[in-house]
Image (cartoon, rainbow, N blue to C red):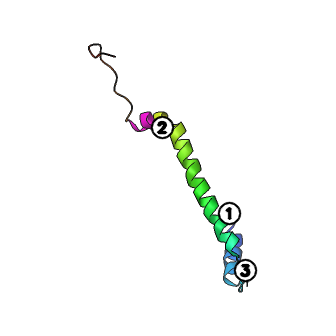
Amino acid sequence: MNPQIGLFCFLMLLSSGPAFAYLDPGTGSMLLQVILGGVAAIGVVIKLYWHKFRIAIGFGRKEKSDDEPE
């Protein structure tokens, strides 16, 4: 990245004034839904790939020996 562009962006952020923005109660609810939806999606992905994940980190099932009953 060009250093002049980074400096320009930094100076623009410092020189910005107040936004006078209004966040209604629905905005907080929407953000909460996005966060909870992301957590649920991560949980579903982990559940779908749990066996592969355990094998990847080295905690897979033990191999059955010949003398163990099935």
Residue 54: image location, x then y, percent: 43, 36
Estimate the spatial distance between the alpha carbons at disc 3 and disc 2, rounded to whole Å: 43 Å
The residue located at (54%, 37%) in the rendering is 48
Residue type at mark 1 is: Met
Task: Specify the principal SS of the magenta part.
Answer: helix
Residue type at mark 2 is: Trp
The residue located at (55%, 54%) in the rendering is 39
- Residue at image mark 3: 22
Image check: 56 left or right of 9? Answer: left
Residue type at mark 3 is: Tyr
Q: Quadrant of residue 2?
A: bottom right
The residue located at (71%, 71%) in the rendering is 5
Residue 70: image location, x then y, percent: 34, 16
Mark 2, secondary structure of its residue: helix
Image check: 39 left or right of 5? Answer: left
The residue located at (56%, 44%) in the rendering is 44
Magenta residue span: 54-58
Between disc 3 and disc 2, whose residue precedes? 3
Residue 49 drawn in magenta: no
Where 41 falls versus 70 (above or below)? below
Q: Which mark is residue 63?
A: none
Q: Residues within 10 Å of mark 2 (few under 14, many from 20)?
A: few
Between disc 1 and disc 2, whose residue precedes? 1
Residue 6: image location, x then y, percent: 67, 71
Q: Quadrant of the N terminus?
A: bottom right
Mark 1, secondary structure of its residue: loop
Estimate the spatial distance between the alpha carbons at disc 3 and disc 1, rounded to whole Å: 34 Å
- Residue at image mark 2: 50
Q: Say which of 12 and 46 sits in front.
A: 46
- Residue at image mark 1: 1
In front: label 1 or label 2? 2
Residue at the extreme left: 67
